[in-house]
Image (spheres, rainbow, N blue to C red):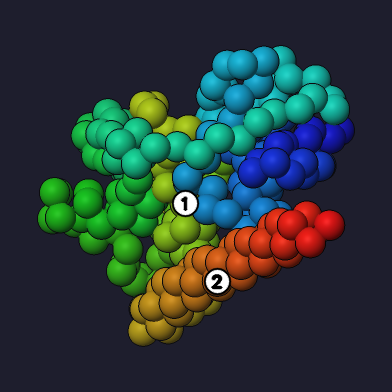
Amino acid sequence: MYISVLINSRKHKISCQPNNQLSTVLESACKKARLPKDSYYLIYNKKRVDLSKTIKQSRIPSNALLIAKKSNVKSNNKKIKIAMQLDDGERIRLQIPSNYTLWDVLEHVEKEKTINLTQNEVENSYQQPTITFMSRKFSTIQELKDTKLSAVGASGGLLRFKYINTDINLTEALETINQAQKDIDSSKKSDEEYHKEMKKKLNHSFDNNINNDQIS
């Protein structure tokens, strides 16, 4: 099935499945538009949709049109109450800003509980942290560092934490962690420069149209 998303006056056609979360639809649209996924939310039939729900749960039909609107800074920074379940079953209740990335959440829990979640090694194998929210699993460092709570519609509920074994050691993992952040920062800078250039072109085109009208 397909869903169209209107974002900044441009329509983007998104291929999806009924069981896909709406957060993935928004992410795909923002990726095509080269815009930050955590700065927008979706509207359908004049109502804001819950990004944590699936397309089927939200009763959104194929070929529907959703509108992406920019969130204000205040709503992005609001604190939410959420719980994290560790791999041993312990649940930790948190009250944290919705603009925290999933990696920020892990580091917050590390400081609050004095435990190690992001730099764990067993028998020379780095234990990769993963987080599952609703039906979505975030299992790479890139995903954890680049996904904010607001972007997945996490206004409450439960984050499930688990480790997975990897074929790299902790030293290699730390390099991967640092590189992931550099890649994210570089991508954001590239997108910002792209939109600045597009804005210049639009302004130049607008000025030319005005000058042509005055001449005629």
The quadrant in which the N terminus is found is: top right
Position of 41 relative to 207 (above/below): above
Task: Tell me, yes or no, whether the two marked residues, 1 and 2, touch with CB atoms within 8 Å.
Answer: no
Position of 169 relative to 13 (above/below): below
> Any mark on residue 110, and which?
none
- The one of 119 and 178 positioned closer to us in this rendering: 178
Residue 87: percent from left, percent from top: 36, 45
Under circle 2, the secondary element is helix
- The one of 130 and 19 positioned closer to us in this rendering: 19
Give the residue drawn at x 85%, y 27%.
63
Residue 87 appears in the picture as rendered? no
Q: How many marks?
A: 2
Residue 120: percent from left, percent from top: 31, 67
Q: For label 2, count other residues whose C-alpha is less than 10 Å away and answer few (under 14), some (14-19) or many (20+).
A: few
Q: Amino acid at mark 2?
A: Glu
Q: Report which quarter residue 117 is drawn in.
A: bottom left
Q: For label 1, count other residues whose C-alpha is less than 10 Å away and answer few (under 14), some (14-19) or many (20+).
A: many
Q: Earlier in the sequence, mark 1 or mark 2?
A: 1
> Any mark on residue 147, and which?
1
Give the residue drawn at x 73%, y 20%.
60
Residue 107: percent from left, percent from top: 25, 57
